[in-house]
Amino acid sequence: MKISLLLGLIPLIIMITLLSKPVPNSPFRPIILPEEYAHLERCDLTQMKGVFGQSFKGSVEAYTYERGIIIVRQVYGVTKEMHEPDECLSTLGYRTSAHQKSYDREGREWSTFTARTRKNHFLVRSMIVQPEGEAAWHSTREWYWSAALKPQATRYLAITELEALEMEL
């Protein structure tokens, strides 16, 4: 199931990479995952390295876990190119539900919605975090204006979890 799930999400990973452009002078830096994600298995993105290398100046990685995939994008500083994951999913033919707020064990707020096609159905959770300052935002709009009002060259991680749900027949 993990391989077919990964193959189904490759277009999403490519789309997020192409549309997410960090601050122009931001160098590529390896992603430093928050401790809670350190145990995850990294997906091999070698076959897409040409796309990533040419189009994305930040960092993006995908990880598998028992219920799905987590995509992590890293940028340094504020960028207008960061966008909500439902934009990518809609472009790929997914129907998405309205965003709801949800909370994790640490009390952080996530944006949560579902995305479905005829073949796939996902519960999607996303947020942007500033690991060093422990700040978190549930929407890119909220993050952008908060970060833009206090400009600093700091690291931000956009975390998107796609949990595979059973399809109803």
Image: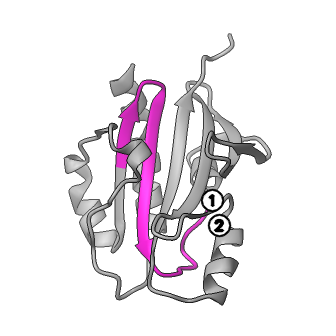
Q: Residue at x 65, y 71 (%)?
A: 143
In the rendered structure, find residue 105 and report the number of the disc placed on it. Answer: none
Amino acid type indicated by mark 2: Thr
Q: Residue at x 34, y 65 (%)?
A: 59
Furthest toward the top, the residue is 169
The residue carrying pointer 1 sits among few (fewer than 14), some (14 to 19) or many (20 or more) residues within 10 Å by Cα, namely: some
Q: Position of residue 161 (x, y in %)?
A: 53, 42
Q: Quadrant of residue 114?
A: top right
Q: Residue at x 52, y 70 (%)?
A: 133
Q: Is residue 27 above or below residue 122?
A: below
In the rendered structure, find residue 140 and report the number of the disc placed on it. Answer: 2
Q: Is residue 11 above or below residue 144?
A: above
The residue carrying pointer 2 sits among few (fewer than 14), some (14 to 19) or many (20 or more) residues within 10 Å by Cα, namely: many
Where disc 2 sits, the SS reads helix
**How many numbered callouts?**
2
Which residue, given by chain and number where applicable, does mark 1 sit on? 84
Where disc 1 sits, the SS reads loop
Q: Are marks 1 and 2 in contact (CB under 8 Å)?
A: yes
Part of the protein shown in magenta: 62-83
